[in-house]
Amino acid sequence: MSQIIKQGGNTNTVHHLSIAYMGTGSTSLLIKELPSEFFINKHHTLEDLQDYLDNQSILTLPDVILIETDSEGKCFNFIKKIKKNPLYRELIIVLIAPERDKAWKASALKLKVHDFYVMPFPVEHLIERLHFLVKFKLIRPQLSVLENSDVIYKLPQMKRIFDVVISAICIIVLAPVLILTAILIRLDSKGPIIYKSKRVGTGYNIFDFYKFRSMRVGADSQLEDLSDLNRYKNDEYPEEEADDQKKRTTFVKLIDDPRITRFGSFIRRTSIDELPQLFNVLKGDMSLVGNRPLPLYEAEMLTSNDWSQRFMGPAGVTGLWQIKSRGKRDISERERKKFDNFYASKYSFWFDFEILIKTLPVILHKEKF
């Protein structure tokens, strides 16, 4: 079941979602405003909700569990319990608080619920967020390209022609460098020459992202152990602006990354590792200039209403935050996201040309991070 709606000039596809809701207070009025395409099982107590879940199979479980917080903290004990059950572990859990409470927020973050809302808030934000969460739940285990994107975007024809011509010329001219780099990577360490990863680009479309491999094999699995080196880990926001999404670390870039190989350090400093992305541009996955496509775990954190605008612009090899961060070792996560949103709303052919020109000195004077 689907329905086409328009919001802010954008056409979106609304899909049927199954929601299990527990609440009796002011949040129940909000639930009534959800569209008819949302199939909602309402429960008055956590015990009722537990009984409902216990009677479901893996094929009939709801997409989302919406729970109203309670003063006694029973909802948090309930979440702890269901997270221990392998059948329920992948359920999307969203909490709705009838009022602000720092203890509730802290408990929600500790339990890693998918989102935490405080009344009042626009119901449209909740609808958008639920669709994004369900979408990424499907992407994560299957790593498949979305058939229906919530954000419909078409690259301007002039920009596409420019991308194809310039990327093709660059590939031909730089062919000796590409071949030599491939040989040296093979000699330097074991593993594939090209590193491929799933990235989220324009309109939340998923594609294979290409780079020359600059790290040891298995580097991705070591990321959590090296989280203390993340440049974006300690971003701080004003208390009045802080919410669950902004408090979580989204972007990842390690200082003095120990996973990088000897030759990998060189190709990173010179940006040679980025050259295979010219093939992404030629294929149409990316543009020469745009917002950097993100790994799935980062993109999932940017589906909130505040920051999803960055995906309304093209995904690019270089972009606004790269040139703005020149000489700044400590550009914050918040600054980067602001640059992304600004570019998505303001980009043009001449703006792209300016960014490309300013990218050259950034490459030549690239800091060793």
Image (tube, rainbow, N blue to C red):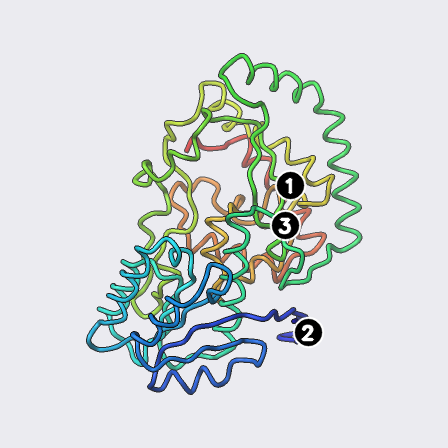
The mark that comes first in sequence, 1 or 3, is 3
Rendering coords of residue 345 (x, y %)? 61, 62
The structure residue drawn at horizontal position 55% and vertical position 47%, both measured from the top left corner, is 142
Reply above or below: 97 against 346: below
Q: Name the residue under label 2.
A: 4
Rendering coords of residue 285 (x, y %)? 68, 45
Q: Which residue type does callout 1 highlight?
A: Ile
The structure residue drawn at horizontal position 43% and vertical position 30%, both measured from the top left corner, is 219
- Which image quadrant: the C terminus? top left
Identify which residue, 76 or 193, lies in the foreground.
Answer: 76
Q: Name the residue under label 3.
A: 145
- Which image quadrant: the N terminus? bottom right
Identify which residue, 345 or 199, lies in the foreground.
Answer: 199
- Disc 2 to disc 3, how far (Cα)? 21 Å
- Disc 1 to disc 2, how far (Cα)? 41 Å
Snapshot quadrant of residue 156: bottom right
